[in-house]
């Protein structure tokens, strides 16, 4: 009961109030009804921001999967001592403050930073990276990497390696054995990690605020601006509804694909 009361007071009530204001609080030229939702979906600038947000979230999910899969796979192949070291590296990266990790990217990507020094040493012109979508994508991939690697490792360590050896003994090449035997068994871990990363990336605020710019804003920055700067609670609530619906749609789609995969295995 104390946990339920805590969630009701500090989660359900403020969330419900924020969503309710999308239909009760209006700023000109909105006057009532679904005007706030229309403002979110009808404006060309808002549509661009929504597309940019979903694109960054999808790319972040793809990049974290590409980086986390070999890392998690390697964790299942090394000795227990090295497994502890690799797991420790993941956990330590999560314990560092998110502000520290983002400002580390500011140091790396600034015009006189190490990355641009390397580019200049190779004979190319320095590139402005801070305040761009690629910089935000790099920072988000770094921060969300453990959320993909840990679910993947939990699934990969349960896969019997003898299944791949059995496939090879029956004539499959190592590549086919990996693609047709090992990878399908790893799909639940990929689904779990992708679900976590995509939903978190949709509402990520700190990294876009530090590494991005207003010209490359994501929906979380617009939502904060409507809340903090303009006190446009109705518009902010409408943005929150769009984020909530998008996250729920992705969760339902992922669950449907996973059920389809299990039915296929059956």
Image: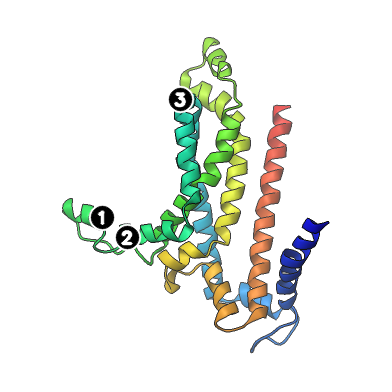
The C terminus: image quadrant:
top right
**Tags 2 and 1 in contact by the CB under 8 Å rule?**
yes
**Quadrant in which residue 255 is drawn:** top right
Q: Which mark is residue 181?
A: none
Q: Which mark is residue 114?
A: 1
In the image, is 83 to the left or to the right of 162? left
Badge 2 marks a residue whose secondary structure is: helix
Establish if 215 lies above or below 125. below
**Quadrant in which residue 54 is drawn:** bottom right
Residues packed near mark 1 inside 10 Å, few (<14), some (14 to 19) or many (20 plus): few
Q: Residue at x 74, y 84 (%)?
A: 32
| Residue on which disc 3 sits | 78
| Residue on which disc 2 sits | 107
Residue 20: x percent and y percent? 75, 74
Q: Residue furthest front?
A: 2
Along the line of sight, the residue nearer the viewer: 137 or 76? 76
Q: Residue furthest bottom?
A: 28
In the image, is 93 to the left or to the right of 247? left
Q: Residue at x 37, y 57 (%)?
A: 104
Residue 238: x percent and y percent? 67, 73
Establish if 168 lies above or below 6. above
Mark 3 vs 2, N-terminal side: 3
Badge 3 marks a residue whose secondary structure is: loop
Q: Residue at x 60, y 78 (%)?
A: 227
């Amino acid at each position: 009961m104390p946990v339920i009361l805590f969630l009701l007071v500090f989660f359900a009530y403020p969330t419900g109030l924020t969503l309710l204001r999308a239909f009760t609080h209006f700023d000109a030229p909105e006057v009532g009804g679904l005007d706030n939702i229309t403002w979110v979906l009808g404006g060309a600038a808002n549509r661009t921001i929504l597309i940019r947000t979903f694109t960054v979230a999808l790319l972040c999910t793809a990049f974290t999967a590409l980086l986390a899969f070999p890392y998690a796979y390697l964790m299942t192949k090394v000795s227990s001592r090295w497994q502890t070291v690799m797991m420790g590296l993941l956990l330590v990266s999560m314990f560092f403050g998110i502000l520290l990790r983002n400002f580390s990217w500011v140091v790396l990507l600034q015009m006189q930073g190490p990355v641009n020094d390397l580019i200049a040493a190779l004979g190319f012109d320095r590139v402005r990276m801070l305040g761009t979508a690629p910089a935000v994508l790099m920072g988000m991939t770094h921060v969300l990497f453990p959320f993909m690697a840990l679910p993947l490792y939990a699934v990969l360590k349960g896969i019997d390696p003898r299944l791949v050896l059995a496939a090879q003994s029956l004539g499959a090449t190592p590549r086919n054995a990996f693609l047709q035997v090992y990878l399908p068994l790893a799909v639940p871990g990929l689904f779990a990690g992708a679900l976590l990363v995509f939903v978190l990336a949709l509402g990520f605020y700190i990294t876009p605020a530090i590494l991005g710019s207003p010209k490359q804003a994501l929906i979380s920055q617009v939502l904060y601006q409507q809340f903090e700067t303009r006190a446009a609670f109705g518009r902010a609530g409408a943005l929150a509804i769009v984020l909530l619906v998008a996250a729920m749609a992705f969760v339902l789609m992922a669950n449907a694909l996973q059920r389809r995969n299990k039915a296929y295995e059956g």
